[in-house]
Amino acid sequence: MAMKLEQLKALLKETLIEGEFPYTPKGRTITAIVVRTTQSEAIFRTDGDLNKETVSASLKDPSPLTRVVVTKRKLTASERRSGREFFRELGIIPEDCSINKSMCGQCVDCLTYGFAAGDKDSDSKGSMKSRIITDNSYSLLEASQISDIKTFNATGESGTMYDLEDGKQRQSINSDEYVRPQAHFIDIETFKDLRFGEFLYAFGNILRTSRYGATPTRIGKIKNSIVAIILSKGEVFSSLELTKGIWDRLEKKEHPLNTSEVEEKTLEVTVELADRLPFKTTIITGEELQEVLETVRMAYKEPEELKNIISELSGWKKDEKKKG
Ligand SMILES: [Zn+2]
């Protein structure tokens, strides 16, 4: 059952910022623990190779293990893109705010994820750091278990192997390294010093994004599952630490893993690691978490109230109101 947005705001109150844009860091932290499961063969890069990193297998076992890495840049860029699409339709992201050209520096997307300096004449002088903090995301299992290479014919523009221009069959064969379906990546997204509207924006983007990758043709379909939300006054553990801790608890370390088992272990390790932190944490999970998720989903289905909350956010420039 969904709650009212006001109730959700009250639940997160201690870890949100009220009113003005936060000029000085307050350390109010909301952390989403996410299990990302591939739903198709997934290619995350344009040059045919996967990113990999060799690290210790687990918290208990120091022997090396090579894992596939999905870079934080890739994850955030895809989520950001889906958020911008949705709110541009609602008229909240201005037409002239463009990630590739000049960012406005004033809309909810620029304020939340940060922006780089625009050209000299634009209004968006300066730049701002993101308040969405992410790590690279690591595969739970070893790279050799969850990836494979396939070769394909490099088709011409007509989509066939027949080259229309010189009337010959094409010869080129390319290969791509891909992640198999039902591979699990463990990830932590941290929301730092956000106002309620900014939180709804960034959190909603995790729930709404299902395609990740460099370009629309080189992508993977991914299902994001949020297994816990941690409220705290400081940053929690890393996604690599969490990944290793889950690996320790897996009975069989073989692809394919059962997704609900992975989610269950993720929650167990989250609770354990949170316990060791030198500050107080509140973990939202179980039924309460389902209620939170349903509330955000409902807010996006009927976006009128969400639109109002986001429109009312003040910008980061102190003299903005006077300028009108
Ligand atoms: Zn903008």
Image: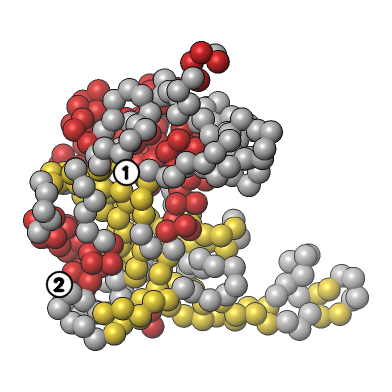
Along the viewing direction, whichever of 162 and 113 lies nearer the viewer: 113
10 Å crowding of disc 2: few (<14), some (14-19), many (20+): some
- Residue 294, position as x, y percentages in the image: 27, 36
Three-letter code, disc 1:
Phe
- In depth, the one of 169 and 18 nearer the eye is 18
Tell which residue pokes out farthest to the bottom in this image. Answer: 63
The image position of residue 41, as x and y in percent, is: 47, 68
- Residue under the image location 38 percent in, 83 percent down: 144
The residue sitting at 31% across, 48% down in the picture is 190
Q: Does 10 sit above or below residue 322?
A: below
Give how far across and how far down residue 229 sits, in percent. Answer: 22, 46
Query: Tag 2: residue type?
Result: Arg
Residue receiving disc 1: 191
Residue 175 in the figure: left or right of residue 5: right
Q: What residue is shown with label 2? A: 249
Q: Secondary structure at mark 2?
A: helix
Q: Position of residue 221 (x, y in %)?
A: 46, 59
Where is the N terminus found, in terms of image quarters?
Answer: top left
Number of residue marks: 2
Query: Helix or strand or loop: what does disc 1 sit on?
Result: strand
Which residue is nearer to you in this view: 36 or 132? Answer: 132
Answer whether residue 255 is visible to the viewer in this image.
no
Q: Is residue 165 above or below residue 54?
A: above
